[in-house]
Image (tube, rainbow, N blue to C red):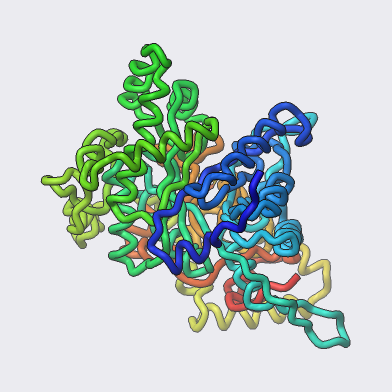
Amino acid sequence: MRTWQKPSFRSLLQETSIFVTCVELVNSRGVIAEREGTRMLKLARELSQNPQIHALCITSNAGGNAMLSGDTLGTDLISRGQEVVIHLSCKDWNRNGLQSQAWKLASEGFNNVLALSGDYPISGYQGQASAVFDIDSVGVLKMMSEMNAGLKISAGQKKKDRVLKQTSFFLGAVVNNHKQYEREVMPQYFKLKKKIENGASFIINQIGYDTRKQDELLKYMDWSGLHVSVLANVYVLSLTAARFFHANNIPGVTVTDDLLALIEKQAGSSDKGKTFSLEFAAKQCAIAKGLGFRGVYLGGHLKSSDYERILEIADQFGEDDWKDFSKEICFHQTDEFYFFEPDTSTQLSSTEINREYLHSKSLKALQVSKQNIPLSYKINRVVHDKAFEKGTLGFGLGKKTSQAIERTNKGVQKILHGLEQTFKMAAFGCQDCGDCSLPDIAFLCPESQCAKNQRNGPCGGTYQGKCEVGEKECIWSLAYDRLKAYGQEEQMLNGPAIFKDGSLKGTSAWINTFLERDHHGNGKKQMES
Ligand code: SF4
């Protein structure tokens, strides 16, 4: 096989106007010599020979199952001059594991990293694996951005801190705006901004089959001044995949009844719907180009020749054909929320903000929404504003009291901490992490109520407002509604990336806040290894 160095993914996106094509490779289970591993290696090598495929993207324990580590396949591809985008997710590693993995990737020549929170683990050896989620996608982006700038590490008590060699990661993140409710869509947009602020230089959107939502993403980013490259996710729908997605087996991915019915009908054809699926994907590629995406991220269990065929079909379309295709590929959920009004002539997104949404933010509407907010939340807000907000009389008093408590003996401190914990356990389900995020999430505890302990906004896994794990509402959807009643939802993710400090576990969160030891007082603290 020929080997040649393909242009870097970063330079293609940042220095050219080339429409970039990436293909997702889902790693196999078992060693690479297994049949599946060999098949994947063969596919990857074939794809790397295709000059039309600019980058291969390797997943990390996709779907929450153990898979062969992505760098095994990736190293082979890099040695062949292929550009690789490696997924790095937070479900299986804590921040030290992620940092160590990042150094390994940098040492092996991987520059392009897609930072994800990751799907919740669903399987494991001798039982389901425990999820880690020590940090989240925003945390990984922040940490790796600092590695790019030259990470400062502590070199022991008497020695000066050391600055490590700069890495040169090109960092990306995912956004999922294919959601039904406003309380899901808007926090996704806010988190997107936070990801970009913390270092994401390219964005890949989640799988979705609604062109208006695709268009809205680009228009929202333009409207918000978020100017980074966005790649459209094009997942090729076989009947098996369509049924799998329709049954909500992949968190955050929706195939509607109408779309499933279409795929099922096509599956009755002589080639079991294959020609249709490839053409459908080619139409999505054409739409992505027409809308202004910087490229596509192709996925699906396909052969190398299938990817070639998709690109070949896409090339044969006329320049404006995508406008007709966009009217065909518009599978949205019932009463799905859009930030912008529709453009009635194109059936795409306009740039006029949703009138109903604007109305829901009027003073009169907010007064009505406030009536549905739990009384406990209203009380917590008042207490927090009077006693825990820096600069208030209450905060000053709390600081002095905390200093006094710290001077008492351990027994007294233990009793007071026990009392605090008893109250907070009953009121919030507090898990005694000592680095409290209640004020960040409208007094909902991420330790006890968020399966992934997300402190910088929602993961992408909600379905109709519900958490991807279990049947309860996502805390970030609930927080959005609570904050919106006070006109504060747009600021919900403002501020620096939040990192929980593990050393505070089992200590008084109140004292830590008053003495500014937690993330509220330490927002600008640099991450150190
Ligand atoms: S509560 Fe929300 S952010 Fe947390 S895991 Fe569930 S869906 Fe994700």
Q: Is residue 15 left or right of residue 32?
A: left
Query: Residue at the spot x=40%, y=30% of the render?
Result: 278
Query: Residue at the spot x=79%, y=29% of the render?
Result: 126
Q: How many marks?
A: 0
Query: Residue at the spot x=67%, y=56% of the render?
Result: 134
Query: Residue at the spot x=44%, y=21% of the render?
Result: 239
**Front residue of 382 and 218:** 218
Residue that sits furthest to the front in the current view:
2
Q: Position of residue 450 (x, y in %)?
A: 56, 47
Q: Is residue 55 left or right of residue 190?
A: right
Q: Position of residue 429 (x, y in %)?
A: 60, 49
Q: Is residue 17 left or right of residue 56?
A: left
Residue that sits furthest to the left in the current view:
345
**Front residue of 13 and 49:** 49
Q: Position of residue 489 (x, y in %)?
A: 36, 61
**Front residue of 33 and 369:** 33
On the rendered image, what quadrant is the C terminus found in?
bottom right
**Front residue of 340 and 327:** 327
Viewer can see residue 506 = no
Q: Is residue 105 left or right of residue 315?
A: right
Viewer can see residue 362 = yes
440 w.r.t. 79: above or below:
below
On the rendered image, what quadrant is the N terminus found in?
top right
**Residue 111 figure quarter:** bottom right
Q: Position of residue 288 (x, y in %)?
A: 34, 48
